[in-house]
Image: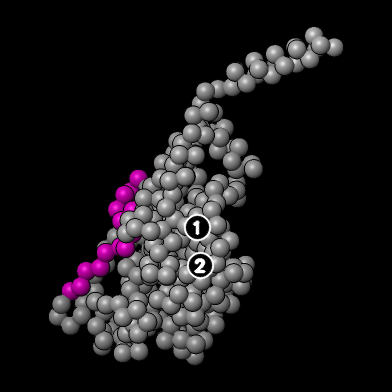
């Protein structure tokens, strides 16, 4: 009996010793890189397996700042309004909540398409406000449509009160936002506008050049198919990404990161971790 027990113990020891060294190495960067994330709430989803690879406070309800504009874009596009229709920036679009500045002057007229482009790529608040105002029934109806779409997507802990994200009453969770990212990525217009690096408009005789708020879009190796950033003091630095890493579509959600570039740094840490995972470890994480 004792001999049998000893043999079993010896076999177990030999099995453990025989495990590939790579399996151990794969777990080291997991702990080190993800422990260094500065975002208060995080969710990483491998869409190929529908598995959550990492989460932190994934169901915490938090302000989402300009991540709001992804829902704004979905509602605008699903309304099937004329994208060539001219919209004009008015005093109603001036930020009375945070008193933020804007390069879109009152009186500027652009197409609905261009307003959406600026809202997604450069997070232009006046453009997002104008899009809401121009919805049938005005901003109030637009916000109702935003909340109805959230419910339809299963975003149970999400609430919108306006279309820009300037209000801290626009709240969601990493889990809910992952659903929004998946839905938004299916729209080619949102994919293109959110990832464009630059866009120019005419205001009077002058040309105004806008840049993407997300510096990661400048890196072609990232494989970003959709992105949105956001910031207000109550929300911290926020970012959502739909990216292809090692040929696997992945959703990343980062909320309430402290530090101007901390959300981008967190995204780079996660991408580096995913890029270094061994196939066996990835399967193990996806199968949890």
Q: Is residue 244 magenta?
A: no
- Residue 271's image quarter? top left
- Residue 151's image quarter? bottom right
Q: Residue at x 27, y 77 (%)?
A: 101
Which span is picked out in magenta?
207-221
Image: 48 above or below 237:
above
Image: 145 above or below 171:
below
Classify mark 1: helix, strand or loop: strand
Residue at numbered disc 2: 62
Q: Residue at x 52, y 23 (%)?
A: 21
**Quick one: label 2 or label 1, which is nearer the N terminus?**
1
Give the x, y percent position of residue 118.
Answer: 33, 72
Residue at numbered disc 1: 41
Q: Residue at x 46, y 80 (%)?
A: 162
Report the residue that reaches farthest toward the right.
1
Report the residue that reaches farthest toward the left.
205
Give the x, y percent position of residue 20.
Answer: 55, 22
């Amino acid at each position: 009996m004792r001999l049998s027990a000893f043999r079993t113990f010896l076999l177990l020891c030999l099995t453990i010793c025989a495990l590939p060294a790579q399996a151990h190495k794969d777990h080291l960067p997991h702990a080190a890189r993800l422990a260094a994330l500065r975002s208060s709430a995080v969710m990483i989803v491998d869409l190929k397996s529908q598995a959550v690879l990492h989460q932190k406070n994934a169901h915490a309800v938090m302000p989402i700042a300009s991540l709001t504009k992804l829902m704004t874009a979905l509602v605008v596009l699903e309304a099937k309004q004329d994208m060539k229709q001219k919209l004009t920036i008015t005093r109603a679009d001036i930020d009375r909540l945070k008193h933020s500045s804007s390069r879109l002057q009152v009186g500027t007229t652009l197409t609905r398409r261009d307003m959406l482009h600026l809202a997604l790529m450069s997070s232009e608040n006046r453009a997002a406000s104008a899009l809401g105002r121009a919805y049938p029934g005005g901003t109030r109806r637009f916000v109702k449509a935003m909340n109805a779409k959230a419910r339809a997507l299963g975003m149970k802990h999400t609430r919108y009160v306006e279309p820009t994200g300037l209000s801290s009453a626009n709240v969601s969770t990493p889990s809910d936002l992952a659903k929004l990212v998946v839905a938004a990525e299916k729209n080619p217009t949102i994919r293109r506008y959110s990832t464009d690096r630059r866009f120019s408009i005419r205001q009077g005789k002058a040309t105004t050049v806008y840049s993407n708020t997300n510096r990661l879009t400048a890196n072609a190796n990232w494989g970003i198919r959709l992105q949105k950033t956001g910031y207000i003091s109550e929300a911290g630095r926020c970012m959502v990404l739909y990216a292809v890493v090692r040929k696997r579509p992945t959703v990343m959600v980062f909320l309430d990161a402290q530090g101007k570039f901390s959300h981008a740094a967190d995204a780079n840490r996660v991408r580096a971790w995913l890029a270094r995972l061994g196939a066996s470890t990835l399967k193990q994480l996806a199968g949890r």
